[in-house]
Image (tube, grey):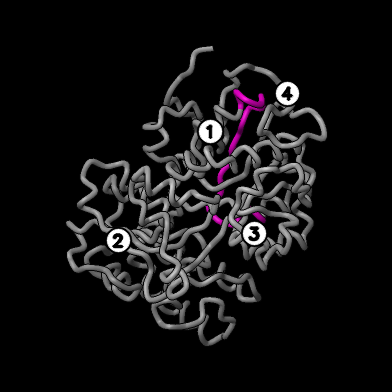
Amino acid sequence: MAEEYGRVLVNQRTANRLTRRAFLTGSTVAAVSGGFLLSACGNGSTGATPSAGGASSSGAIEGSLNMYNWAEYDDPKLYKQFQSQFGPTVKVDVYASNEEMIAKLVAANGTSGFDTVCPTGPNVPQMIQNGLLEELDLSRIPNFSSLDTVYTNQSFDPGNKYTICKDWGSTGWIYDKRVVTTPIKTWSDFFKAAEGQASRNVSVLDAAVDFMGMYFWANGIDWNTTNTADLDAAQSYLVDTLAPHIKNFDSYPGIQLTKGNYALSQVWNGDARQGLLSVSNPEDYVWGLGYPKTELWMDNWAIVKNAPDINAAYAWINFIMDPTNSFTDVNFHGYNTGIKGLEAKAKAAKMQYFDMIFFPPSLVSSTMVNGIVNEAQQQQVDILEKAKAKASA
């Protein structure tokens, strides 16, 4: 079957998330009904059992694998390789925030049709409590042993009963220095630029915790505060002062900024790296990790409750955790997967923008803070929605 490269049929919401990189990689992925569908052009087999290196099987691998994930989060070449090796057609639907993903799974009440999902750590307990995730059988994921123990047994999921680290990263900014001529060193500088040289040409992440986080990090306030005065002060600034200067709420701004659609963006480190890799003039853009504080997040592989293709889900998680496959994936998405020996291998290979992927432990401990889902969550979401309304007014 002939492959058609770069042919996309997609609704506008998903089109806004697609990046030029997807086409540059020669991807065989086409966006369909808001997701990505890998055509079944490999060996065409279904019901295959794992070959050497695959997950141990409790049955035949199904003919499809339906993922619900963040956009541009795995190398499309690996979808094709997985299909060739194991048989399933891979379909990926994307979301912009954990809140969006959880709301969809709750509404589906066990009938979403998704097999895997990638929640961020603090959201995992909420998903467990709501019965949204299958309990894992780690014996079916032999490559779990490839994961450095620093990234196992997290407080949000002791014993990895429901989740396994996919990757982790942080948040900062990227800007066009031809427009923003005053260097940005702190979140306070980010706000000054947003209200000044980059006004109405600014994007911020379409995620309540990150949007709120900027204000708290800039002002020395606990990111996980539930104090009413803190939340009200954040709302006053973010909605009344900052929002009128915002052009868009965009969880994947890296490519958009380097295409000239923004002059300044709040951005996750891997997405910023993808933006820099997409242009011929990366020297015109400046990446900075959030300071004096910023977030430390960990996204995690999980299997959705009542997953229709559970054997395929296990096979995929084990496949993507293979050290060779993980190296390929990191080079694509730009986030540390925590696989043993990965950092040394990436350094030896002179992986581009290495410092945007692998942060020194001293920097992690001094600037990065874990998030918590607490009773302030609904107010944070409300503040984000108010800011969107104000920005579009």
- Callout 1, which amino acid? Leu
- Callout 4, which amino acid? Ala
**The magenta segment:** 83-102
Q: Which residue is mark 3?
A: 152
Q: Reading the chain from its start, which is encountered first: label 2 or label 1?
A: 1
**Looking at the image, which residue is at 73% across and 55% down?**
162
- Callout 3, which amino acid? Thr
Q: State the image coordinates of residue 39 (x, y, percent, origin top left).
A: 57, 23
- Local packing at callout 1 (Cα closer than 10 Å; few below 14, some 14-19, many 20+) is some
Q: Which residue is mark 2?
A: 200
Location of residue 311 by image quarter = top right
Looking at the rendered image, the disc whose residue lies closer to the viewer, 2 or 1, is: 1
**Looking at the image, which residue is at 78% across and 52% down?**
135
Q: Which mark is residue 48?
A: 4
**Looking at the image, which residue is at 53% across and 38% down?**
325
Q: Reading the chain from its start, which is encountered first: label 2 or label 3?
A: 3
- Local packing at callout 2 (Cα closer than 10 Å; few below 14, some 14-19, many 20+) is some
- Callout 2, which amino acid? Arg
Looking at the rendered image, the disc whose residue lies closer to the viewer, 4 or 2, is: 4
Check the image and name the residue furthest to the right.
Answer: 58
Is disc 4 in contact with disc 3, using a CB cutoff of under 8 Å? Answer: no
